[in-house]
Amino acid sequence: MEWKDGKPGMSKNNRSVRDYVKYGYRIVLGALFSRKVDQCGKLLRVCGNVTLSKVKRARFIIGDNVVLHRDTGFYLDSSDAVIEIGDHTFINRRTEIMCKKHVKIGRHCAISWDVSIMDTDYHHLEGTTSTKPTVIEDHVWIGNKSIILKGVTIGKGAIVAAGSVVSRDVPAHALVAGVPAKPIKENVSWSV
């Protein structure tokens, strides 16, 4: 198969990951995926299949230099749903975001693999609210297999340990862990 831009031809069977990156395949996937998005910044990198399921009038907004790894999923399940992802945020493999109202992820966040983020219970118990906005502020690190439940705000610079279930707000610069997640350390900082 010849590349249209004059790059050397490669069959599907002998392409390596390095070839895809070298010839800009990640950027091509990002450009194709960005057509499905309501608002998209520059340099979206999509590293494999990404699922986007949304109803009419739902909005999906992506900032600059966002990385979406393979098998991530975004589910906007009502016409009022809005998912926002800030600049320089990284979302790893098999992470899913379910939204009926509003899920906001800030800038410079690192979200590990197999994370679930939701703003809804997808069912209604009498006397409760089934949907509340979920906010992840800037520079938050969420460990693998964590679950972020509806109505939670995770403060700037916070860290969520792997396998945690976050059902309450997380203070800024706190490390939380457990089921349910509780603060175990304050004044933490992290870097990539």
Image (tube, rainbow, N blue to C red):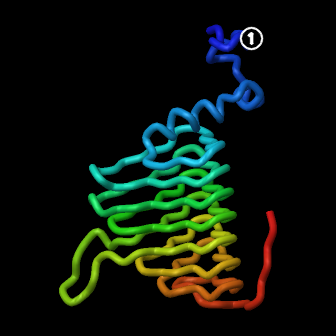
**In the displayed structure image, the side of residue 44 where residue 49 appears, left or right:** left
* In the depicted structure, whether residue 165 falls above or below residue 84: below
Image point (47%, 83%), residue name: 167
Q: Nearer the viewer, residue 191 or 84?
A: 84
**In the displayed structure image, the side of residue 192 where residue 139 appears, left or right:** left
* In the depicted structure, whether residue 14 falls above or below residue 74: above
Residue 20 sits in which quadrant? top right
Percent x, y of residue 120: 35, 71
Image quarter hosting the C terminus: bottom right
Question: Which residue type carries mark 1?
Answer: Pro
**In the displayed structure image, the side of residue 46 where residue 122 appears, left or right:** left
Residue located beneath label 1 in the image: 8
Image point (33%, 65%), residue name: 100
Image quarter hosting the N terminus: top right
Q: What is the secondary structure assignment of the residue under circle 1?
A: loop
Q: How many marks?
A: 1
Q: Residue most toward the left?
A: 126
Percent x, y of residue 115: 54, 63
Percent x, y of residue 92: 62, 54
Residue 106 sits in which quadrant? bottom right
Image point (70%, 17%), residue name: 14
Image point (59%, 48%), residue name: 41
Q: Nearer the viewer, residue 41 or 132?
A: 41
Percent x, y of residue 177: 63, 82
Residue 139 sits in which quadrant? bottom right
- Local crowd at mark 1 within 10 Å, few (<14), some, or many (≥20)? few
